[in-house]
Structures are given as C-alpha cells and as structure tokens.
Image (cartoon, rainbow, N blue to C red):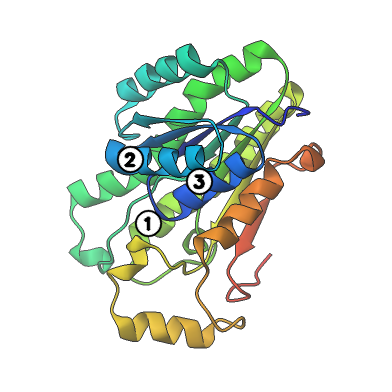
Amino acid sequence: MNESDALAVVTGAGSGMGRAIALGLAESGRRVAALDINEGTAQETVEMIRGKGGDATAFQLDIADAEAVVAVRDEVVAHYGTARIVVNNAGWEEIHPFMETTTDFRIKIMSINLLGAMAVSHAFLEGMIAEGLGGRVVNISSDAGRVGSSGEVVYSGAKGGLIGFTKALAREMARHKICVNCVCPGPTDTAMLHGAPKKLTDSLARVIPMGRLAQPEDVMHAVRFFTSDDTSYITGQTLSVSGGLTMAG
C-alpha cells in the first residue's frame, strides 16, 4: 500500500485481540479508528496508543446494527478520510450444547460474528474502491470455523461462514487491488475464554503442541503481516494461529 500512516479500522478494539491488533498497527505507524460496543474500553485503547505517540480515535459501535455501521463509517471518514485497512475482529460467544440454544441466541451469534463483519466490510469498502489505491481487509475467524468445536456449534457455523465470505470477497476485490485474508486463532487467552472452566483451559494448554494458549499479540502479528506492504500478492488465504493444535489445510 506504500503508506505507513494509512488509516486502519479495527472492530472490537477495546480489549483482547482487538486491542493488541490496534496497538500493533499503531506501532507500525498506522492511524487507528478503534471501534467497540464499549466506548470506554475503546478510549482506553486509544489512550494507550496516544501514550506511545500514535494517532487513534475511539468510536462506539454495535456491529450488529447495520444502520449504525454506516453512520459510524461516515464519522470515521469525516475525521480521518478513507480507510485503507479494515480488521473485522469483533466477536461474541457463549458455550452451550446446540440443542440447548434458542433462536435469539443463534441470531445474536450470526449477527455479531458474520453479518456484522459483512456490514463493516461493505461500508468501508465503498470508499476504498472509489479511491482506487488498494487496501486490506483482514477477518478474524476461528479454528472453530475450520474444524468445528463442541459446545460452539452456532459459533463454528458463523466463523466458517466468515472464512467463505473472505475467500469470495477476495475474488471480487482483487481487481481493485484490495487483498482480503482471514486469521483463525486457536484457544486464546482473552476474556471470552476466561469464562470457561479452568479444567478446560488447562487441558487445552496440554494438548497444544506449543504448550500454551495463544496470547493476543500472537494474533496481532498475523494481522500485521497481512496488512504489510509485503503481502500485495496474497489474498483469499486462511492462516491458523493455534500453536499447532490444528494443522488441517
């Protein structure tokens, strides 16, 4: 992209992987629009970036609200101009056996983990395409979407859909020099996993070949790779960050 100060939009930037991604992109010289449903935590991320000399602004957004996505896109563009990087990181999950899930639960999972990423991509790609300078979209899926996960059936379906969305969008965006790729974290030490029983997290650490859960920074490095100037010929790819837990192609 040849612009070290390109604007990066990061959803779910208020905590966990999203915060690590926002910080990592800022360290690379990117300006950051930190989007999160919790404006307070997004502002904390912004203050961390500014404390290191970076340029960032917080925006409150529920990505499941399509109208709000467009409104916030307009705010971001008015403040910074056209985004060159979009990272769809925001996600949500609770562990339940599939037959115990409700319609409302299933709709919420799909709205946040799949439809929200579609809405954000659609909104910000309009300007990116019109500007004609290329760009990057990185979707944060999950290894649950690649291989399935018991207790996360609906989540696995949404994240698998995000992988398919990534590949199809990459085909359509290639002519605009916009690369679209997907990062699939394995079990990661974030708030989403903190609610799981310690017995489960300990067992996960034992079966991961690297011997530990992923840290948010591990995922950040993969995102930073896909948003670098060195990846202009890489698109439609899915990269697992799982410490070797899953190795399927």
Label 3 element class: helix
Disc 3 packing (10 Å; few <14; some 14–19; many ≥20): many
- The residue labelled by disc 3 is 162
Q: Amino acid at mark 2?
A: Ser
Q: Is residue 13 visible?
A: no
Where residue 28 sits, quadrant-wise, is top right
- The residue labelled by disc 1 is 155
Label 2 element class: helix
Q: Can you say which quadrant of the picture contains the C terminus?
A: bottom right
Across and down, in percent, residue 209 comes to 61, 83
Where residue 71 sits, quadrant-wise, is top left
Q: Amino acid at mark 1?
A: Tyr
Q: Are marks 2 and 3 in contact (CB under 8 Å)?
A: no
Across and down, in percent, residue 27 comes to 62, 44
- Residue name at image x 45 percent, y 81 percent: 204
- Residue name at image x 45 percent, y 44 percent: 48
